[in-house]
Image (cartoon, rainbow, N blue to C red):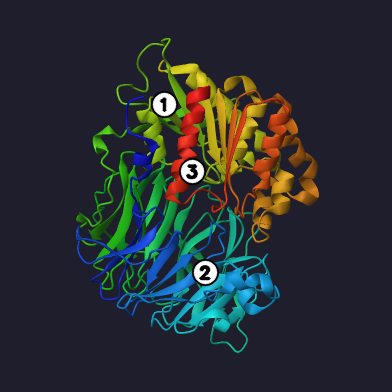
Amino acid sequence: MDGYEIERYLNIRSAYGTSFGPDGDRLSFLMNTTGTAQIWTLEDAQSWPEQRTFYDEQVSFASWSPERPELIFGMDEGGNERTQLFKLDAETGEIVNLTAKPDAKQRCGSQSRNEPRARIARAKHRWGGWSHDGERFAFASNRRDESVFDLYVQQREETGDDATLVYEGDGWLSLAGWSPDDSRLLVSQAYSNFDQDLYVLDLEADEPDLEHLTPHEGDVRYQSASWAPDGEGIYLATDEGSADTLYLAYLDLESGEFEIVADGNGWNVGGIALDDETGRFVFSRNVEGYTELTVGEFDDDDPTAFETFPEPDLPGGISGGVSFDPDTERFALSTTGDTVNTNVFVVDLETGETERWTSAPTAGIPRKTFDESELVRVESFDGLEVPGFFTLPDGHEAGDGEASDDGLPVIVDIHGGPESQRRPSFSSVKQYFTDRGYAYFEPNVRGSAGYGADYAALDDVEKRMDSVADIEACVEWLQDHPAVDPDKIVAKGGSYGGFMVLAALTEYPDLWAAGIDIVGIANFVTFLENTGDWRRELREAEYGSLAEDREFLEEISPTNNIEQIEAPLFVLHGENDPRVPVGEAEQIVEKAESQGVPVRKLIFDDEGHGFSKLENRIEAYSAIAEFLDEHV
């Protein structure tokens, strides 16, 4: 088939994860030019970037010190998600491991599991931000007990186990930042994706303890929390008061009262980036999957009043990851869209004027060849409207034409989560397949985020299979589409989306030409038993608990319904996956083979929950393309 090979598409680069340096004269970002995301810096728009890290593993974030030319960044090993923190001196290039010692992993086998160095190497470290003076940083980690996260503060010059344990947690704790005077930390505790609490930890107290800010009953979201400039309140996105979608609120710390700052107008406020010195901010709304930005400045005398500035005109339709410069005159962010690969732009805060700073290349593939999606809605079995993004190759229109014998094959690509959302962002894999003559359908079935709490709860526990029935409705819609070959429809998905693929193949076997399961759940019981200890409680809140729902979880697990499967199946996984252990892939392959189903398996021994390394992505998607050539 004519067109570019998958290797070319996977060499399309992305630039994101921006952070302004302390003098405002340098901007860091992450870019995957070498095959994995590394740190790069720029001094001017479109100038030649300088690569600052050179690892085989991907860097997950980078944050400049507010006072010195140094960054802290995170990186795991082989996709195991046990992120360690490192400090990069931007002047000398020296890198220091701040958490585990450089040889910690190699020495773990010969040391006691409780020896500090070995214990830290096995732990996750979740970034909590720099203090304003740049002398300290905070993080949450499960060093003490793998199932819970404690809070730590560490001096910038300290390494290894020198960090100070400031609070012992009893669940999924994370940090939302230092107070303006650096005396307190804002803390979040998550019970599920739709239920959290906020706390303040006073670091100067004789015995620091959490002050509970958000006592509540039922599920309430308290997200994207930021300190107000005077330290007397908190801005956050919440659905407090039984709202279905998230709105921007101000929480007065003295009274404990919430005030609405900005409504989502039926859509979720996605979060707020706030400079706690000037009160300047950027917050977003997620409208049908597209980003709407509001830029402004809060009133010094009324925390709920603000002046707005012009909205920046950014390409692509999806933006995020805001970083202010030190003077809060500009902010950087990344933007993407169906036909726009991710790049970093800098925006003048008061005028809204934008300037593209990075030039992440498209591997020589003309941008005009990229195909754009259309937002569609499909009526499901109970009348619910299921939104989705439908992409047809160039030359086809989404609602036109007549059925023909040479209709298009379609890939139905199902997101994970399930509390996630497919948005019209750039996907090199999607563009590769549309270039090869496939249509692409990305549904947001019930249970997806972005459409309110009620919609997201429609697949909880005993209603799990209703979301699979939504997939059936989407396939029936596709079968009726004049551009589609109804006998060439493929199910593809990763993580929870992998479960959806397997469930769709076993529940509705006659609909599918093939299935592609990437790091997917095959059996909810074995998944919950073997997933990372720190994740189990959060996942049971969504899927059901082993103690109370085991029989139901067994009943809906694809491994226990494998006799229904008919379509050829390709299973891909990472050996080091801490979320969905590789045993899920092993058991579904074994059971499908026992049914005589054509099965292919591909396991990467240096990957985790997904494929981060370019050579592995090329191998994986080349194999997927070959598999579809054979069976579709």
Judge whether 24 appears above or below 518 on screen. below
Tag on residue 421?
3
Q: Residues within 10 Å of mark 1 (few under 14, many from 20)?
A: many
Q: Quadrant of residue 369?
A: top left
The secondary element bearing badge 1 is classed as strand
The location of residue 262, given as percent across then percent down, is 40, 56
Return the mark for residue 353.
none
Q: Amino acid at mark 2?
A: Gln
Amino acid at pointer 3: Gln
Give the residue type at disc 1.
Ala
Q: Is residue 524 left or right of residue 514?
A: right
Give the number of the disc on residue 439: 1
Residue at horizontal 76 percent and vertical 39 percent from the top: 554
Give the spatial CA distance, label 3 vs label 2: 28 Å
Locate residue 530 relative to residue 127 in the image: left or right. Answer: right
Which quadrant of the rendered structure holds the N terminus?
Answer: top left
Along the line of sight, which residue is nearer the eye, 455 or 426?
426
Front disc: 2 or 1: 2
Q: Is residue 407 above or below residue 280?
A: above
Pointer 2 residue: 84
Point out residue 113 in the picture as x, y percentages from the top left corner.
70, 73
Specify the quadrant of the image occupied by residue 54: bottom left
Label 2 to label 1, Cα distance in Å?
41 Å
